[in-house]
Image (tube, helix red, strand yellow):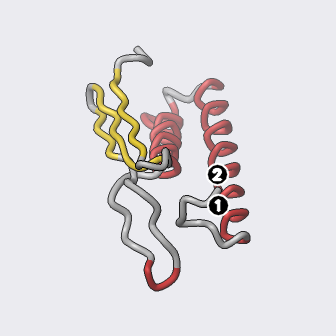
């Protein structure tokens, strides 16, 4: 079931990640295509970010925990939520470090 989706990742001429898609039954994600830029040149997003998708997954699992009076609550959901929260914290740490180096929103590593 986990492999029942199709992924396409794209890069620019320099090999830097640009956009892409993930499609499957009930799933259609278009990834952010290119960096947003910085300052006055910062563009609006044109696709999804990994953080947004993870936050959506976390919300769904939290819903399972309370739906129908908690009928579907389980340790597996709680552990998955905890790991998604950890992933989101790591990604936030990455963003803060990139902001500190003033490279967030660019293709600079």
Quarter of the image where one finds residue 2: top left
Q: Which mark is residue 95?
A: 1
- In the picture, measured across the screen, residue 106 lies left or right of residue 93, that is left
Q: Position of residue 24 (x, y in %)?
A: 29, 27
* Callouts 2 and 1 close, C-beta under 8 Å: yes
Q: In which quadrant is the N terminus drawn?
A: top left
How many circles with numbers are drawn on the protein? Answer: 2
Circle 2 — which element? helix
> Who is closer to the viewer here, 42 or 50?
42
The residue carrying mark 2 is: 91
Q: Is residue 105 above or below residue 47?
A: below
> Who is closer to the viewer here, 86 or 93?
93
Q: Is residue 78 above or below residue 42?
A: above
**Real-space CA distance between mark 2 and mark 1, rounded to the nearest whole angstrom:** 6 Å
Q: Position of residue 40 (x, y in %)?
A: 46, 85
Q: Is residue 71 above or below residue 57?
A: above
Residue appearing at x 63%, y 33% in the figure: 78
Which residue is outermost to the bottom? 40
Residue appearing at x 32%, y 45% in the figure: 30
Q: Position of residue 104 (x, y in %)?
A: 59, 66
- In the picture, measured across the screen, residue 6 lies left or right of residue 50, that is left
Residue appearing at x 48%, y 40% in the figure: 57
Q: Position of residue 35 (x, y in %)?
A: 46, 61
Q: Residues within 10 Å of mark 1 (few under 14, many from 20)?
A: some
Which residue is outermost to the top? 1
Q: In which quadrant is the C terminus drawn?
A: bottom right
Residue appearing at x 39%, y 41% in the figure: 10
- In the picture, measured across the screen, residue 103 lies left or right of residue 65, that is right
């Amino acid at each position: 079931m986990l492999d029942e989706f199709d992924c396409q990742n794209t890069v620019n001429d320099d090999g830097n990640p640009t956009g892409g898609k993930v499609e499957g039954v009930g799933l259609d994600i278009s990834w952010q295509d290119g960096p947003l830029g910085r300052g006055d040149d910062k563009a609006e997003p044109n696709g999804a970010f990994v953080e947004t998708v993870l936050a959506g997954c976390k919300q769904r699992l939290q819903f399972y925990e309370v739906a129908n009076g908690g009928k579907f609550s389980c340790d597996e959901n709680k552990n998955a939520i905890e790991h998604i929260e950890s992933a989101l914290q790591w990604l936030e740490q990455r963003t803060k470090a990139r902001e500190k180096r003033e490279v967030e929103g660019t293709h600079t590593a």
